[in-house]
Image (cartoon, rainbow, N blue to C red):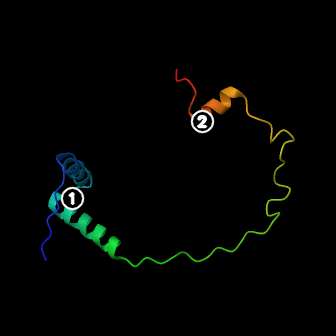
Amino acid sequence: MTMTITLSPEQEERLKVVAAARGLDWNEFATASLIRVIEDAAAPLTPPAPAEPRPFGLAKGEFVVPDDFDTPLPEDVLADFEGRAERV
């Protein structure tokens, strides 16, 4: 079976740089990379095993929640979190 894959000039150049940095032949590197991608895509997908729930109190005594934990943040800090802060 023959497969043709077209790369943009930028993609090809990036792969050539990586191949050269690793001291590999461009054609061998490209072929090995494509085979790896095809093998990964063909791998069977299995759902993760269900996780056991963590017990309550696992970190008891390791930290203290401050009394002001629920107080609103100052406007400048809130603006940073929401991406509204002015960039300098």
Q: Which mark is residue 24?
A: 1
- Label 2: few (<14), some (14–19) or many (≥20) C-alpha neighbours in 10 Å: few
**Compared to 41, does 60 lie above or below?**
above
**Compared to 13, does 82 lie above or below?**
above
Residue 40, percent from left and from top:
34, 71
The quadrant in which residue 52 appears is bottom right
Residue 62, percent from left and from top:
82, 54
What separation in Å lies between label 2 and label 1 (alpha carbons)?
Answer: 46 Å
Q: Between residues 54 and 18, which one lies in front from this camera angle?
A: 54
Question: For the point 72% across and 71% down, which residue is it?
Answer: 53
Residue 16, percent from left and from top:
20, 51
Dot 2: element: helix
Kind of residue at badge 1:
Leu
- Label 1: few (<14), some (14–19) or many (≥20) C-alpha neighbours in 10 Å: some
Question: For the point 84% across and 59% down, which residue is it?
Answer: 60
N-terminal of the two: label 2 or label 1? 1
Q: Which mark is residue 64?
A: none
**Compared to 24, does 72 lie above or below?**
above
Dot 1: element: loop
Q: Between residues 25 and 52, which one lies in front from this camera angle?
A: 52
**Compared to 3, does 59 lie above or below?**
above
Find out whether the residues at labels 2 and 1 contact each other: C-beta distance under 8 Å.
no
Residue at numbered disc 2:
82
The quadrant in which residue 26 appears is bottom left
Question: For the point 76% across and 35% down, which residue is it?
Answer: 72
Q: Between residues 7 and 33, which one lies in front from this camera angle?
A: 7
What is the number of callouts on the image?
2
Kind of residue at badge 2:
Glu
Point out the frontmost of discs 2 and 1. 2
Quarter placement of the N terminus:
bottom left
Question: For the point 83% across and 63% down, which residue is it?
Answer: 57
Q: Is 80 placed left or right of 42 in the picture?
A: right
